[in-house]
Amino acid sequence: MLRPQFRVRRIGQRYDCAEVDAFVDRVLATAERRSVGPEMTADDVRAVAFSTPFLGPGYSVEEVDHFLAEAERWLPSGTAPDTAVAGGGTATAGGPVAGGQQAPQFSTVRLQEGYAMDEVDEFVDRLLATVNGQPVARPVTADEVRNVQFRPVRFSEGYDVMEVDAFLDTAQAWLRDGMR
């Protein structure tokens, strides 16, 4: 399946490019059956909310909304209860994983230091696949969790540092103690 190309706008109604890109990647991974994390559902698509960039470019709201309406038709329906790491906020890897650990939701920050959302999302997807016994090319180890470093962001949207670090502490214990 081809990745959609959205027009970039500098003014007017627009969505944060990084948030949209991360979400579209997850939708396409589910549709193509190559997802390493929790699969997306039509309910996830209906519930998503993207922020508007304070300054700078963003994707055309109309084009993204049109893609999301189409995606609802090819994804399975099904509602999963929300789970969150302290503070709640925007979704990363989604909701619960069947029979395993749940994907966190991290608050987003702007104008203070946060972690690069795409890096955190990718690592969390691999981590959850490892912990939940799903196939993954590079399983995550407790040492990798302890030593992982994400790119800090300051002027663009990122995940709350304290929430991500707290989740990593919990995940390290899952791996160290062999919890599944």
Image: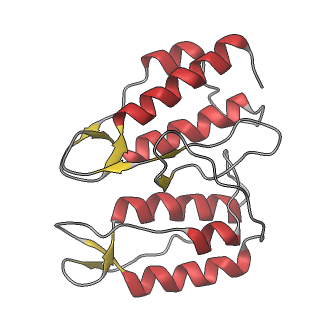
Give the left or right position of residue 172, taking residue 87 as reference: right
Looking at the rendered image, the quarter that the N terminus falls into is: bottom right
Please name whichever residue, 19 or 137, is drawn nearer the observer in this view of the structure: 19
Q: Is 177 placed above or below 102 here?
A: above
Please name whichever residue, 163 or 180, is drawn nearer the observer in this view of the structure: 163
**Residue at the right extreme, as displayed:** 99
Q: Give residue 112's position: percent from left, percent from top.
A: 21, 43
Please name whichever residue, 143 or 165, is drawn nearer the observer in this view of the structure: 165
Looking at the rendered image, the quarter that the C terminus falls into is: top right
Q: Residue at x 66, y 46 (%)?
A: 37
Give the left or right position of residue 12, taking residue 115 as reference: left
Q: Residue at x 42, y 67 (%)?
A: 50
Q: Residue at x 56, y 72 (%)?
A: 2
Give the left or right position of residue 36, taking residue 54 as reference: right
**How many marks can you see?**
0
Q: Give residue 143's position: percent from left, percent from top.
A: 53, 12
**Residue at the front extreme, as displayed:** 87
Q: Give residue 134's position: percent from left, percent from top.
A: 76, 37
Q: Give residue 94's position: percent from left, percent from top.
A: 61, 53
Q: Is 41 placed above or below 138 here?
A: below
